[in-house]
Amino acid sequence: MARKVGPDEQGWCVDVSGEPIVNKGLRNVCVDESKICFIDGSSGRLFYRGYRIEDLAKYSCFEETAYLLIYGKLPTREELNNFSDHLKEERELPDSAIRILKLIQKDTNPIEVLRTVVSFLGTIDPDKHDRSREGRHRKAIRLIAKIPTIIAYTYRIRNELELISPDPTLNHAENFLYMFHGEKPSSSSAKELDLALILYAEHENNASAFAAVVIASTLSDYYSAIVGGIGALRGFLHGYAIVEAMNQFDEIGTPDNVEKWFNEGILTGRRRLIGFGHRVYKTYDPRAKIFRECARKCAKENGGNIRKYYEIAKKLEDIALASKLTEKGIYTNVDYWSGIVFYSLGIPPAFYCTLFAMARVVGWTAHILEYIENNKIIRPRYYYKGEIEKKYIPIDERG
Ligand code: ACO
């Protein structure tokens, strides 16, 4: 007799033959409905709240995109001004957080510093016990505003530079570069960072967003959820790939060495090409196309090391896209070119994962807020393959 599709007596979801359906890595599993982001993985299209990423990249700014993602609609001029002002008011870090930054060992990975200080901020947030919608929004704005300050101060403390107070006349991207470098950025640098923040702000149910939502679904606090998101981002299969892509270009060293490096490392299957491959995209990532063009411009305008990175990356990409990788749907992803853009902003590679977090905190927040409006604890199963009813043997009788 044919078995129904659905949970069996163990609660395992079974197929028509009665076999439990195991989706390793939760590939293709939908955990809920959402109105935040749509990835069309076969034709390489991406939409935030229905708007094409190319349009947001061209016409929007980080603050407006953040508003769109969190509140679900494009703001009016007045709403955008209020939101931007609110962010500006919340940029300062409390002295206690600065003391913690100074206490952390200087060789700690910047993304781990960020994770630690975000966790600390959760203990002193004035709304930490407020679970209302408004309380959650206030916490989110506070954290989105403070993350750039944490990153800039991490850099300045480890380089023994004086800390620069946030400047309320500057927008989010400009102010970050100002606090990081200690001087006002050119308008082209600020625009490049603003663009990068838009491109990195959100990406559906990726590992870090899911980690954050899993934590939020237990009705844990907002900061714990964000700390979980940062923790998931830190792996190089996810956000740390930006750093590893730059390390990969460094290892290759010169454009002349690309082909040999690719044939020996990637074609033999000994290692993975970082900045390539994606769970959802089976074609070129639309964000990577925008970053590629931006990296090309940076290389043309700046020359030097930026040009060298660009030439290595370009040659490597050409070879990879002409190889058998594309037969498996492995194409350039967002983390391949973005490091070259960040490098042209004078930011050291060790910080690139933190820049990703600085943008993605918006997407995490949007998903947390959307999910808990209609919450259900996230609690999937493992299909148990071990033994049961084993006889317990006292320790002295074990062979
Ligand atoms: N280089 C070489 N081969 C690859 C790559 C790659 N970058 N990515 C996947 N493959 C191969 C795998 O070896 C596997 O081959 P097989 O079927 O012969 O065993 C096949 O493609 C499928 O790979 P999976 O690991 O099953 O794909 P999955 O969807 O689980 O992984 C991931 C996606 C983690 C992004 C993967 O493509 C990868 O490791 N990429 C490199 C790291 C990277 O760039 N991460 C950033 C992703 S974007 C982001 O998170 C912002």
Image (cartoon, helix red, strand yellow):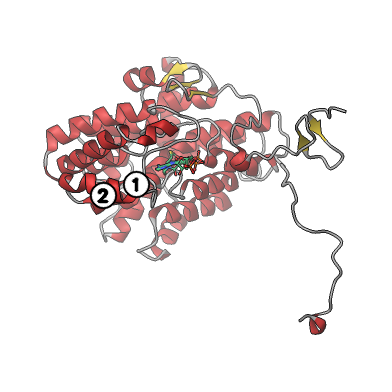
Residue 347 locus on image (x, y percent): 26, 46
Q: Is residue 227 visible?
A: yes
Q: Does residue 390 appear to the left or right of 355 in the view shown?
A: right
75 vs 111: above or below: above
Which residue shows up at 39% across the image and 66% down it?
105
- Give percent across and percent down for residue 131: 67, 38
Q: Are marks 2 and 1 in contact (CB under 8 Å)?
A: yes
Which of the 4 image quadrants contains residue 8?
A: top right
Residue 170 can be seen, yes or no: no
Q: Residue at x 44, y 33 (%)?
A: 328
Is 190 located above or below residue 81 in the figure? Answer: below
Q: Earlier in the sequence, mark 2 or mark 1?
A: 2
Mark 1 crowd level (few <14, some 14–19, many ≥20, 10 Å Cα): some
Q: Which quadrant is home to the N terminus?
A: top right
Q: Which residue is mark 1?
A: 266
Q: Quadrant of ligand 1?
A: top left
Disc 2 marks which amino acid? Trp
Q: Is residue 331 shown left or right of residue 20?
A: left
The amino acid beneath tag 1 is Ile
Q: Helix, strand or loop at disc 1?
A: helix
Mark 1 vs ligand 1: CB under 8 Å? Answer: yes
| Distance from Cα at disc 2 to Cα at disc 1 | 8 Å
**Above or below for 116 versus 267:** below
Location of residue 307 in the rendering, given as x and y in whole percent from the top left corner: 15, 40
Determine whether the residue tagged by mark 2 lies in a helix, strand or loop.
helix
* Left or right of residue 160, residue 150 in this image: right
Residue drawn at (39%, 54%) of the image? 110
Q: Which mark is residue 394?
A: none
The residue that label 2 is drawn on is 261
**Tag 2: Cα neighbours inside 10 Å, few (<14), some, or many (≥20)?**
some
